[in-house]
Image (cartoon, grey):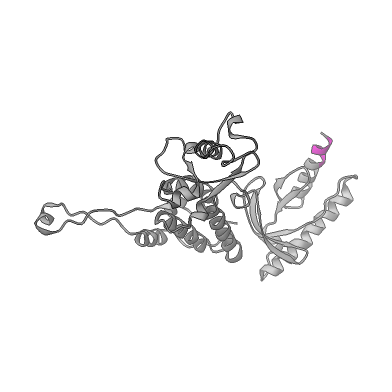
Amino acid sequence: MCLWWYVNSIHLTLLDISLTYHSIDTDSVFCHLPRSLCDGKTPEETVKRAEEIGREIGEYVDKHFLRPVELEFEKVYLPFLLLKKKRYCGKKYEEGHVKIDMKGLECVRRDFCPLLVDTQKKMLKTLMNTMDTQKSCEIVQMAIQDLMMNKIPLAKLTMSKKLSRSPEEYKVKAVHVHLAERINKERGVGHGFVAGERVPYVISKGQSMKVSENGVLPEEIESGKYVVDLDYYRENQLIPPLKRILEKICNDPRSLFMFHRVCKPKVTGVFASWVKKEEDEPSYEAQKQRVTKKTKKKLLMDFF
């Protein structure tokens, strides 16, 4: 109760000096500074002015609030992309050092495939360094295209999870547990997975309606025994995390994930005249150009 009173009082104080309260936790406050307060001729000038305002806020709070309340300025983000509480990315300026800071996003967690991690990191670094949303969108488009054309190395699609106990002891069995249980039965005691080991797996196509039962070892894909489920990786691994970011920076994020395979048989000879002519399905490049024409190129700063 006492803590909330202090936090709420700081919130009101920030509003009184024309700053927007952006995000707050038990030990930190984020403020969105209006451009009119700190806009400089260069990004460096803007950051310098923002740092000065940040220190002024800290001194003001320390002067007007009783101890142990203390507000110490830490850093400036420019640009800054906030998805939700504790999930954000920004170009961080702190004590003379500049770094791309990513918090709570899929690319800093271990439960997604390396393809998603690499794509999201590359997209966000491009966005933070250039503030060009078009370049960031193109990175996503190329990742989707390469995936659906089976150009991604198997290592980039391989995930892994640790067995905290033996597979038989799990009541709810995730994909790595189902796989470990199957491998243990096939290989016998002493040749399978035990508690404490990480189980590498790839999601394969067509075994079961349940994704948790479709995990296979990478070597089972390499041997040709199973085939990678490319649609699973696009719909479940790539689209949801990337779409949440793209919704903040472009008008039609779903169009970036379009991909169509053209697999129509070519009919020749006397039978060709019997086949109704259909317009060829637009190629990926044609779709990309059409989307680009419809979407006005925007910079990240246009959204602030």
Magenta-span inclusion, residue 67: no
Q: Position of residue 282 (x, y in %)?
A: 31, 58
Residue at the bottom extreme, as displayed: 41
262 relative to 226, above or below: below
Identify the residue shown where x is 84% and y is 53%.
Answer: 60
Region in magenta: 2-6
Instruction: Decide if residue 300 is on the left or right side of residue 36.
Output: left
Quadrant for the N terminus in the image: top right
Q: Quadrant of residue 144?
A: bottom left
Which residue is the extreme one toward the top?
Answer: 171
Q: Position of residue 234 (x, y in %)?
A: 45, 49
- Main SS category, magenta section: helix
Q: Residue at x 66, y 70 (%)?
A: 42
Q: Is residue 287 left or right of residue 239?
A: left
Position of residue 177 relative to residue 265, above or below, is above
Is residue 282 placed above or below 190 in the rendered structure? below
* Residue 302 at least partly seen: no
Give the position of the C terminus as an image quadrant.
bottom right
Image location (x, y in percent) of residue 202: 49, 47
Residue 4: within the magenta? yes
Question: In the orientation shown, which residue stands out farthest toward the left?
Answer: 270
In the figure, residue 125 lies in which quadrant? bottom right
- Residue 70 lies left or right of residue 102; in this view the side is right
Q: Nearer the viewer, residue 32 or 139?
A: 139
Q: Nearer the viewer, residue 209 or 238?
A: 209
